[in-house]
Image: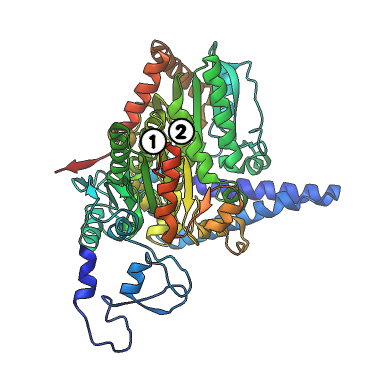
Amino acid sequence: MSTFSDTVRELEARLRDLEATARKTGQNLDTIISPLRAEVEKYRAQQSKAEAAPSESTESPRWERVKLARTPGRPTALDYVERLCTEFHELHGDRKFGDDPALIGGPARWQGRPVMLLLQQKGRDTKSKIKRRFGSANPEGYRKAVRLMALADRFGLPIVSLIDTQGAYPGLEAEERGQGWAIAESILRMVQLRVPAVCVVIGEGGSGGALAVGVGNRVLIQENAWYSVISPEGAASIIWKDATKAPLAAEALKLTAPDLLELGIVEEVVPEPAGGAHTDMDLAAELLGPVISRHLDELGKLSPEELKAQRAARFRALGAFTES
Amino acid sequence: MALDRFFRRRRPQQQASTDAPELWTQCPACKETLYNRDLDTNAFVCPKCGHHLRLDAQRRIHVLIDHDSFRQLSGHLHPTDPLNFQDTEAYTARLSRAQEKTGRPDAIMTGTGSILGVPVTVAVMDFAFSGGSMGSVVGEEITRAAEHAAQAGLPLVIVSASGGARMQESALSLMQMAKTTVAIEALAEKGLPYISILSDPTTGGVTASFATIADVILAEPGALIGFAGPRVIQQTIRQNLPEGFQRSEFLLEHGMVDDVVDRREQRQYIASLLGLLMKRSVSA
């Protein structure tokens, strides 16, 4: 039943395949195999730990949602693009350092209308997941997003941003190249946009790495997606020094779609097929497409100045405090 | 001045120890025992090794802003517990403790004042309060400070010291990154300069929002500055991190900060820089 053990099984199967391929062809696939093996070992360790401790997930409906958001086979950004867009021209690179496969984008037709897509893409099989770092972008990903936003502004293309990341990539090179700076610049560029921007969290919305492409005139979330300042595992590591306490952290963080609607973080929850988006990708796309189109229609009535002002006012109003 | 209290209650000058915090401080870097009055006159930089000690908000204002020029803007906003956040301890209990410890409602102090006669709006973060984490109050105070600067036609100086966005307000904390950016952008539209000073430590959501979109970004020597924490990075890459990784000097070398400026020279540096950026004429 557990999607967690499914993930481990899937990873183990891929690992065996890769090792067999490496043996057969004599190719050196260590750069792919080693990180995967590390991943599998990490999962196995977590799994045995989780099995040793009494399961907390049954007491955490929010953790069940997090697991749904991570279910293998859940549609990725490109799965939606393939079903809802035509003429997608993926434009590569930040023109400064490199191209990031974790955050991609370019112009396309969204159900017939020209838009600029910003997509956090996790990958669909083990190989592409590793290549795309499971959707965790490097600075060049955010700098590419900034470049594409400038292009959108120049040609009046509305932005459609699909968010799906556990967070920006916490790597050594990412820090050297200014991960924080790149995220901040992307947030700033979104604040400056004079075109409509509709952002949808389609799976995981982890921290600043998600917000970097989440400063929209409208921010939506799918029924079984989550959005939070930190991943449940990250929070659990800080609070209990134990990532397996993630279910408890998920409860505390109030990170589900209904929570976020109540907090005023999102405008709307986009329904998924019963059982989750992975059960029927076509239906999931049919449910998502028209919602985004409707918001684009509504925003299309605003002038560039009004769009920028509306977005600024939307985020200016967020926060909870008392004043004496 | 609150700092005067440090010198009033004198004890016999026996060996320096932790039981006399009013008089002595041990340098966390070189372990030298330092007389607080010497530290105060040296902007809380160790006279022996040059280590920049962490400052609470009060002391930061004291070393940065002309004495008697500071007028506080912050202080009226109080944090709430919108998520009813409960981990090993209730968020409300953590807040009360931090408020008692620091004497302020949250991890920030803002106001107006002057630096060597140059009028500024200033916001300083307080790492002593919940690791300087940014929740709704910090976000709102930064935003209001930037709005005040824009309205009054003043430059903005922010001194960051923060572990990042505050976990206990979850998505609302995250949204402060966008909110503060909205206000900074509006200030920039007005043509007013914003100088960001990154002090030890500045990480997470503060690094990834208002702290790094300044016109000029300065770092204090030796400060830890980055997005992800070193431990998280180490777990990800499974290698030891290079010497000096994520320190100010490392970031200067990688082109991420405009300069590393000794705290004792910051007032002069900022006053001069603002004079140039705002094209103030100086009497010869």
Image coordinates of residue A116 in percent, x first then y, are 55, 21
Q: Which residue is mark 1?
A: B184
In the rendered view, does A22 fall on the left or right side of A50?
A: right
Regarding residue A231, the answer to whether it shows in the image is no
Image coordinates of residue A131 in percent, x first then y, are 66, 41
Could you tell me which chain the residue with mark 2 belongs to?
A: A
Image coordinates of residue A12 in percent, x first then y, are 64, 50
Q: Amino acid at mark 2?
A: Leu
How many tags in the picture?
2
The residue furthest bottom is B14
Q: Nearer the viewer, mark 2 or mark 1?
A: 1
Q: Which residue is mark 2?
A: A188
Regarding residue B40, the answer to whether it shows in the image is yes
Q: Is mark 2 in CB contact (under 8 Å) with mark 1?
A: yes
Residue at point 41%, 31% (across, down): B191
Name the colour scheme. rainbow
Q: Amino acid at mark 1?
A: Ile
In the rendered view, does A50 fall on the left or right side of A109?
A: left
Q: Give the quarter of the figure containing the C terminus of chain A.
A: top left
